[in-house]
Amino acid sequence: MGKISRRVATDVGGTFTDLVCFETDSETGESRVITAKSDTTPPDFENGVLNVLAKGGVDPSGIDYFAHGTTVVINALTERKGVKVGLITTEGFRDTIEIARGNRPDFFNLHYEKPAPFVPRYLRREVPGRMTYTGEERQLLDLSGLAEVIADFKADGVEAIAVSLLHSYANTDHEERVLAEIGKLWPEVSAVASHQITREWREYERSNTAVLSAYVQPVAARYLAKLDNGLKTQGLKNNPYIMQSNCGVDSLPATSKTPITMVESGPASGFWGAAELGRLIGEDNVLALDIGGTTAKCSLIENGEVRIMTDYWIERSRKSAGYPIMVPVVDLVEIGNGGGSIAWVDDFGKLHVGPQSAGALPGPAAYGKGGTEATTTDANLWLGRINRDYFCGGSVEADMGATETALAALGEKLGVSTDEAAEGIVRIANNNMVNALKLVSLNRGFDTRDFTLLAFGGGGAMHAVALGQELQVKKVVIPAAAAVFSAWGMMMSDLRRDFFVTQLVDMADGAGAAIEGVFAEAEAKALATFGEEGIGADQVTFLRYGKFRYQNQEHTTEVLLEGGAVTDAVLDKIAGDFHEAYEREYTYRLDAPVEMVGIHLVAKAEVGKLEMRPEPLGDADASPALKGEREVNYALEGKHVASIYDGDKLLPGMEFPGPAIIESSGTTVVIHPKNTVSVDAYRNFHIALNV
């Protein structure tokens, strides 16, 4: 036996903390996969990580590569558990983050109130000085009053300072000087400037992003330091990498400076995993669906690339405008439908599922922890889709009495039987998820028949086939590590940083050199930041995108720029690509001049990415994995006697027809009548719908 290489990823979710460990023998090439789940442990999330390592029997001293994703940032924002922030902005712009935007969602509500800013007015201060939108200094910066501002912040108990000055995306000089002065006057305070996070225009969005980053920075820095210390104390030799919202990982020191970049790190890793798995199995066009305990998230992957955007908002709903965060985030739609989503009846006798969730405690009624309201998990259990004798992989004894009581009470409100109430929950949950999937596909001009639905998370495999049949996708794929797929995705991620720079350029003669100059400057900055961490230029690869619009429009469409340096000779091709992308999304194109608004540069470097090795395909006979049969209610197709298979015993090459159920320790795959299943060389389940 040779040296054992261990790559580990952990993902902290709202309910569970997941672990995936790949052990590979350097001589034989043989590998094994260790997966584990343990309870998430707020507010000391690092304990959950150490617990899941212990539960999986993984010694940190033997880990060669460690990646970590966490919900600590989004939790701190939504639960308002950040720190007291002071904001320093340009004279006359103190109220930008309170004025916000006028496009309120609850448009006809005359009593609508905007969400309260994270910084009250008395903690928002101004400094004289002004840049123009082209980056020229219009008014000299005056820092003579900054000492008084800092003294007031100290007296008011401020723990972090955000700096956002007008047009700093075009010229960062004033923000840099304010930061330097804060460092002299109050070196202990946490401070961040907007240009350190984004170089895009839109004053409100950029200011709010700086504020929210400052709000969570001390909390996230403490958490990451405690995690690092806990791992190092137990023997971890290498520095951990932290999953980002842009589907890449970054170093722990870099993430600690601007932790807002990991606001959606959990979903991002899952969707990147979906893209990587799609490449492995020859499916470049993927609809990715992640169903957890509280939410369902979905994203569209075209030609193997995950779409990244900066128009991201938290807490946005039909009744609230929410808060913008202008950082690179995977383009996703999220709804409040998961395994723990509560079913309820409104005043008009209509059944709803979610967005309220039973969480981990008390959890669904079946957990036997005091939950009294029926959830999606209870419905799946009652209908036989989940094995009551193998609930949560056999780790929990299903409380069927509590499940029946909860479903019967719901049925009584609706005037239907317990079975019909459970069927209704599953059908409504499926409908909610179908609508979310349509938002990222059909609503953007994509035909779902050209895509493969790849579903993961604890609940993804239970609902995927029904959703795939509704959307008429090519097929459904359930990954081998579906229950811990987000953690698996982290090990497929590169060290990645996204650079967005606003620069208006008309697509006329000379534009090629101007655009190339913006890219060259961004690439030089990227190489410098990687170089600070010992990563050479030969290890870094770039991907270039341009953000274009018809002249004087408000918003942009992103276009991939291929073929090396941008010159005037390729401007017509770039404009043609823009017309095509614009028409696909909006159904029309205009005979109007095109202008570039900015660039999006992706810089990547490999830092221990996992290489998957296929296994040889064996006998198609799946009978060795057959556990037995039971009656299953499929909600739409009625009751059928389904074959029950042990997921751990299904080997590459095996095939079998539905109706069937595949049971693994972390997830249950529901195979409907007329479906056929095959196991690929990586032990993923491919489900042909045949409807």
Image (cartoon, grey):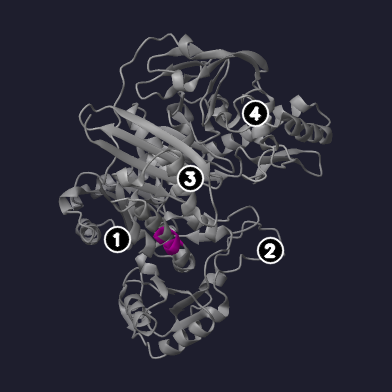
Residue 597 visible from this viewpoint: no
Mark 1 and mark 4: Cα distance apart in space: 55 Å
Rendered residue at 56%/45% (across/down): 15
| Between marks 3 and 1 in the image, the one whose residue lies nearer the viewer | 3
Disc 3 packing (10 Å; few <14; some 14–19; many ≥20): many
Q: Position of residue 241 (x, y in %)?
A: 34, 51
Q: Earlier in the sequence, mark 1 or mark 4?
A: 4
Q: Is residue 144 left or right of residue 384?
A: left
Mark 2 element type? loop
Q: Quadrant of residue 193?
A: bottom left
In the picture of the structure, the residue carrying the numbered disc 2 is 112
Q: Which residues are magenta?
A: 220-225
In the picture of the structure, the residue carrying the numbered disc 3 is 332
In the picture of the structure, the residue carrying the numbered disc 4 is 380
| Between marks 1 and 2 in the image, the one whose residue lies nearer the viewer | 2
Q: Is residue 234 above or below residue 272?
A: below
Mark 3 element type? loop
Q: Earlier in the sequence, mark 1 or mark 2?
A: 2
Q: Position of residue 269 (x, y in %)?
A: 41, 43
| Between marks 4 and 2 in the image, the one whose residue lies nearer the viewer | 4
Q: Amino acid at mark 1?
A: Val
Magenta span dominant secondary structure: helix
Circles 2 and 3: CB distance less than 8 Å? no
Mark 2 and mark 3: Cα distance apart in space: 27 Å
Q: Is residue 284 left or right of residue 92?
A: left
Q: Amino acid at mark 3?
A: Leu
Q: Quadrant of residue 672?
A: top right
